[in-house]
Image: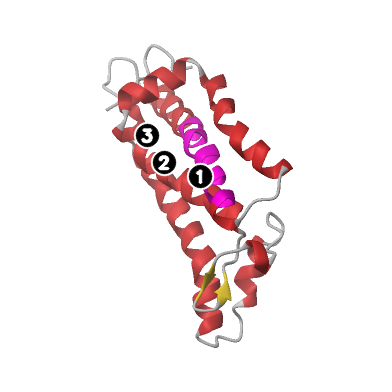
């Protein structure tokens, strides 16, 4: 929960923008592997290797770009896109962020479609969608942690924003 000195306005900080930049780079790497492979770059498998510890990378369960599979399956791509969109959107949705911050356990509700999708066979679009829905609200948690850190480091009497 947000402490009294913190507010959802403090979701906009240089650290939050740094997190957004890191998410965009990570997401770009998912697509870069397919682009590099399609261009004939001999070391495109290095990017796929980067994602291998966290994703099965089964080509039949992945989106393809220029005939090459992305470095992450459709579900993982949805998780990455959803988290990135969440990091970008939550600072723009302060009222909704404040409501969810008061009850962060509600984020688990957004995991239900993902859990159902894991139990049953579905196609890439459905896997992508459930990953997106699950990850979007999760992005609020590190933003709240960043806001807490920012407020905690601000000397008393100074305005954190």
Q: What is the number of callouts on the image?
A: 3
The residue at 52%/47% (across/down) is 129
Location of mark 2 (residue): 87
User: Is 61 above or below relative to 69?
Assistant: above
Front residue of 82 and 161? 82
| Image position of 7 (left or right of 119) | left
Query: Which stretch is magenta?
Result: 126-142
Front residue of 121 and 140? 121
The residue at 39%/40% (across/down) is 16
The residue at 59%/36% (across/down) is 113
Q: How crowded is the residue under tag 1: few (<14 C-alpha within 10 Å), some, or many (20+)?
A: many
Front residue of 151 and 35? 35
Question: Residue 155: which quarter of the image?
Answer: top left
Question: Residue 91: which quarter of the image?
Answer: top left
Q: How crowded is the residue under tag 3: few (<14 C-alpha within 10 Å), some, or many (20+)?
A: many
User: In the image, residue 56 lies at what x, y percent?
Assistant: 71, 59
* Residue 104 colored in magenta in the image: no
The numbered mark at residue 90 is 3
Which element is circle 1 on? Answer: helix
Question: Residue 134: which quarter of the image?
Answer: top right
Which of marks 1 and 3 precedes in the sequence?
3
* Residue 134 colored in magenta in the image: yes
User: In the image, residue 139 lies at what x, y percent?
Assistant: 48, 37
User: Is 12 above or below relative to 95?
Assistant: below
Which of marks 2 and 1 precedes in the sequence?
2
Location of mark 1 (residue): 132
- Looking at the image, the residue that sits furthest to the top is 4
Label 3 vs label 1: CA separation? 14 Å
Which element is circle 2 on? Answer: helix
């Amino acid at each position: 929960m947000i402490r009294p000195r913190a507010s959802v306005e403090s979701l906009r900080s240089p650290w939050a923008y740094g997190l957004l930049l890191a998410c965009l780079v990570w997401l770009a790497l998912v697509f870069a592997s397919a682009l590099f492979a399609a261009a004939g770059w001999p070391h495109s498998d290095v990017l796929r290797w980067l994602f291998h510890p966290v994703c099965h990378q089964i080509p039949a369960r992945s989106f393809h770009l220029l005939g090459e599979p992305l470095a992450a399956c459709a579900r993982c791509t949805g998780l990455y896109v959803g988290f990135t969109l969440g990091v970008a959107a939550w600072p723009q949705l302060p009222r909704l962020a404040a409501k969810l911050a008061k009850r962060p356990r509600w984020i688990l509700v957004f995991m239900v479609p993902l859990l159902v999708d894991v139990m049953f066979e579905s196609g890439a679009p459905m896997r992508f969608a459930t990953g997106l829905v699950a990850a979007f609200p999760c992005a609020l948690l590190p933003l709240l942690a960043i806001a807490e850190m920012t407020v905690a480091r601000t000397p008393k009497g100074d305005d954190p924003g």
